[in-house]
Image (tube, rainbow, N blue to C red):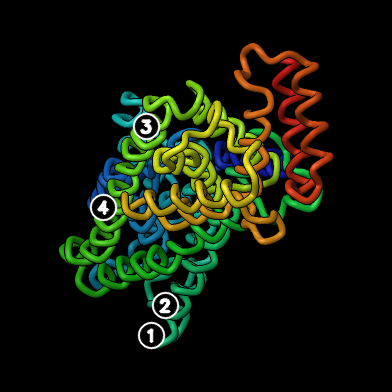
């Protein structure tokens, strides 16, 4: 999916969600609430879930959060057809209205703090709840009071199938939104790679979301609203685990920032070199279609790629490892990887640092980008004072060294540098 197509899809979903919310609110106000107590409890649960969103620190472009409780509560209300054995009475319009109002109430404090998710999150919630409610109406006999239209043994399976389908569609829309927000379009042939990682990360939470939503619906149908607190326990455990994981990842940044500064403070590398390489590597990675964990690992590896220079007895002249022989480059790279592993940095980052001196055909893509961008900065120097002639000469030397640098990475670097020069 191209970035333009993804942007159009996101815009269409936002517009459709706005129309659905307006229609649902109008219909609910006109007809009145069915079982106001049930609607209030589910609405408050959605609001609480939005307030309990887990912020994921590894995303630099905007604030990425996940709200399993809010999504499960909203979807559970859409799937709910009975309350303590009696008909719930609400239709798709009321399900959408309760989900939208509860989500907006819960997001208001986050908006004030600047931590709210993008509008696409609310649009996806509204569309998912509406689709689930429409699919579930026939399962409950279209709201008739004579019970479900399917056997009791098949009802949980049908509800779970609907929840999983809605969750998968939501994951597709979430991946499209991330693709539309990506800075710079990936070159031809790499759009699929750019979309797979965010899609996988969203699909990973779909089973837990669907199972909890079905549990909400079935528990309320059998025991009424008092069963909801017990049903919240599993999803709250998952959210706590996500919060702990996010907190652990957040500690990587201060650690890596300190390691990145150490070679500069020791006089082993020019001031600002690590930061320039990291910023340029991230831009080149986006140009190549990297997203998510690969892009983060690339940035971290670029920040710390010169840590190995603290170990050799003879400092590298000017800190430019690109001018060293292959053996010296590999020794510095291995020393840097060893330091990172002892510091508890993620294995993917340490592996990229260790592999930056290997032949590019044996390197992961992160190490290929790191090696090329590092060599470019060594050849050009301070990016703030380098002129067009110096940039062109550096790119020419990288292209000439075809066995050391992958041509695809060099061309991506050339495009990024050209765009930056035009600004």
Say which of marks 2 and 1 sits in front. 1
Say which of marks 3 and 4 sits in front. 3
In the image as oriented, which residue stretches furthest toward the front?
314
Q: CA distance from mark 2 to mark 1?
A: 8 Å
Residue closer to the observer: 25 or 172? 172
**Callouts 3 and 2 close, C-beta under 8 Å:** no
Residue 383 location (% of width, % of height): 63, 19
Say which of marks 4 and 2 sits in front. 4
Q: CA distance from mark 3 to mark 2?
A: 67 Å
Residue marked by disc 4: 244
**Callouts 2 and 1 close, C-beta under 8 Å:** yes
Residue marked by disc 2: 148
Among the two numbered marks 4 and 2 on one chain, the one whose residue lies closer to the N terminus:
2
Q: Would you say residue 129 is visible in this rendering?
A: no
* Residue positioned 52% across, 53% down in the render: 354
Among the two numbered marks 4 and 1 on one chain, the one whose residue lies closer to the N terminus:
1
Q: Secondary structure at mark 2?
A: loop
Badge 4 local density, few (<14 within 10 Å), some, or many (20+)?
A: few
Q: In which image quadrant can residue 250 be found? A: top left
């Amino acid at each position: 999916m191209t970035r333009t197509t993804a942007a159009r899809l996101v815009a269409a979903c936002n517009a459709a969600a706005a129309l659905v919310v307006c229609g649902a609110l109008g219909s609910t106000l006109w007809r009145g609430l069915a079982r106001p107590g049930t609607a209030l409890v589910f609405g408050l649960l959605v609001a609480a879930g939005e307030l309990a969103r887990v912020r994921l620190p590894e995303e630099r472009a905007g604030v990425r959060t996940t709200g399993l409780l809010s999504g499960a509560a909203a979807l559970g209300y859409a799937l709910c057809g009975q309350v303590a054995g009696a008909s719930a009475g609400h239709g798709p319009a009321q399900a959408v209205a309760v989900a939208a109002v509860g989500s907006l109430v819960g997001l208001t404090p986050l908006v004030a703090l600047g931590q709210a998710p993008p509008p696409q999150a609310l649009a996806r919630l509204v569309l998912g709840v509406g689709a689930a409610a429409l699919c579930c109406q026939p399962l409950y006999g279209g709201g008739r009071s004579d019970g479900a239209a399917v056997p009791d043994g098949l009802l949980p399976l049908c509800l779970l199938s609907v929840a999983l389908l809605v969750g998968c569609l939501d994951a597709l829309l979430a991946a499209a939104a991330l693709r539309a927000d990506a800075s710079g379009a990936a070159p031809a042939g790499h759009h699929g790679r750019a979309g797979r990682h965010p899609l996988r990360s969203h699909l990973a939470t779909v089973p837990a979301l669907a199972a909890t939503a079905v549990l909400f619906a079935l528990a309320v149908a059998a025991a009424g609203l008092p069963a909801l607190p017990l049903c919240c326990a599993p999803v709250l455990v998952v959210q706590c685990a996500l919060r702990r994981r996010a907190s652990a990842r957040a500690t990587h940044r201060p650690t890596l920032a300190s390691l990145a500064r150490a070679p500069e403070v020791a006089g082993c590398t020019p001031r600002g070199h690590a930061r320039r390489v990291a910023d340029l590597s991230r831009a080149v990675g986006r140009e190549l279609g990297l997203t998510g964990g690969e892009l983060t690992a690339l940035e971290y590896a670029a920040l710390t790629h010169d840590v190995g220079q603290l170990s050799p007895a003879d400092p590298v002249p000017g800190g430019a490892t690109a001018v060293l022989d292959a053996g010296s480059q590999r020794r510095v790279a291995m020393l840097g990887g060893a330091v990172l592993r002892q510091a508890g940095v993620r294995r993917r980052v340490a592996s990229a640092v260790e592999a930056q001196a290997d032949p590019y055909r044996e390197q992961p893509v992160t190490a290929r980008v790191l090696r090329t961008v590092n060599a470019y900065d060594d050849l050009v120097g301070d990016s703030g004072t380098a002129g067009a002639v110096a940039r062109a000469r550096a790119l020419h030397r990288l292209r000439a060294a075809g066995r050391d640098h992958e041509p695809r990475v060099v061309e991506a670097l050339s495009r990024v540098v050209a765009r930056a020069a035009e600004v």
